[in-house]
Image (tube, rainbow, N blue to C red):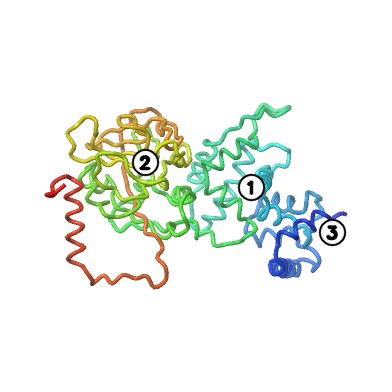
Amino acid sequence: MGNSQSSSSDPHFISASRAFTQNELQELKSVFTSLASKSDAQFISPSVFKGYVGIEGPLGDRLYNLITRNINDEKLTFEDLVMAKGTYEKGSINEIEEFIYQLLDVSADGFVGRSDLEAVLRALLDYIFSDSGSGGGSCQEIVEAFINSANFSTVGEGSTANSMSFEDFRSWCALVPSVRKFLGTLLKPSDPGSQVPQLLNRESIDANLILLRKEYAWHIGGALAQDDLEEWKLLYHSSLHGLSFNTFLGNISHKGPTILIIKDKEGHVYGGYASQAWERHGDFYGDMKSFLFQLFPKAAIFRPTGANHNIQWCAVNFSSDSIPNGIGFGGRVHHFGLFLSGNFDQGHSFACTTFGSPCLSKTNKIFPDTIECWGITPKKPQGEIQDSAKGTVLERFKEDRHMLNMVGLANSSE
């Protein structure tokens, strides 16, 4: 068999080797030797390899077969490992995405169908949330939400079901960055928990009422920096605090980046990540780190396109129709990508060029059932610990005045 022989003269191996430094090759050799010693000392067996990457089932089998170039002799050589990592980690964007696209075809029939995607997503969620005890029905709901955001535009020969084209795959990856990030790091075993923020809820609220499940947090976190995946704290929940705009502003004021989540009366769940604190403005503000998202029945992320800078909207106690009171993201006045009125009893969502997003709900008009907001606590550099005893009175004054400014009651010299 081809894999049972030395491939040191293989031009593909020689080319792949050049992508690594000598130290990297030595480290790879050490990894290979360690894993091979658990097999037969010459090759890495499927079971040892899957134990190393932590992925079992069809996805683990498919990854092993791709690395061994589908020779099916169950013998993964050092040359195989170098060539696979040379493409998967050191290749061009197109080469890496082509490898991942092939990885999705767990049935190895040359097509990526819904059943392939379901098998991949189940393996992925099992790996990341293996210790969380998620129920089967809960997992299926999450899997379907991810699949619902994918397109299957290729008509398969001899099959009634369409498959996912390479362009469909690339578009899907943009909508589900957490999935793309995970599939792009399978040969770099890491702690799966590092991609899921710790959700902190210090209030006495039924956990079943919380919209932000850990799987949704992982999905949203795929569009954030690693330092923003430390702790997320629940700042406001309508079941606990009531559907009150002023209470909402009071709880989130001066809290930095936040995640707003809405479940409407149609059962759709969606929201937005605000990279800047919510502050009273008479116009749009914010930066290009913010984004909109859907969680159910579709899971998708919509980042800024650069078409305009109409990112965040927070208008409080304005009397002009041209400045609608409420909070929103994207689009334009009266035609936002997402908007909640100052009464918190209704809002709207339209397709918008700011984020390249569709209407997030079933209809443009939305009626909130539940609203919650989470504050993100970024990871601080070692040693950057603030003395809570310093400036306590001053900080309290600043926060109180900030809230008064939010609702337009503080005196101003402007």
Name the residue beneath numbered marker 3: 7
Which secondary structure, mark 2? loop
Amino acid type, residue under disc 1 in the picture: Ile
Q: Disc 3 vs disc 2: which is toward the camera? A: 2
Q: Position of residue 379 (x, y in %)?
A: 41, 63
- Label 2–label 1 contact, CB within 8 A: no
The correct choice, above or below, for 96 with respect to 365 in the image is below
* Residue 150 x/y as whole percent: 56, 36
Density class for disc 1 (Cα within 10 Å; few <14, some 14-19, many ≥20) is: few
The image quadrant that residue 393 belongs to is: bottom left
Pointer 2 or 1: first along the chain: 1
Q: Is residue 169 left or right of residue 239?
A: right
The image shows residue 3, relative to residue 173, as above or below, that is below
The residue sitting at the left extreme is 411
- Contact between marks 3 and 2 (CB within 8 A): the answer is no
Which percent across, then down, holds residue 181?
56, 51
Q: Mark on residue 93?
A: 1
The front one of 98 and 146 is 98
In terms of sequence position, does the residue under pointer 1 or pointer 3 come before the other? 3
- The alpha-carbon separation of the residues under discs 1 and 3 comes to 26 Å
Viewer-nearest residue: 67 or 86: 86
Residue 208's disc is none
How far from the left and from the top, in percent, is residue 385?
34, 71
Label 1 or label 3, whichever lies nearer to me, is 1
Q: Callout 1: helix, strand or loop?
A: helix
**Amino acid type for the residue under numbered disc 3:** Ser
Task: Find residue 311 and name its label.
Answer: 2
Alpha-carbon distance for marks 3 and 2?
54 Å
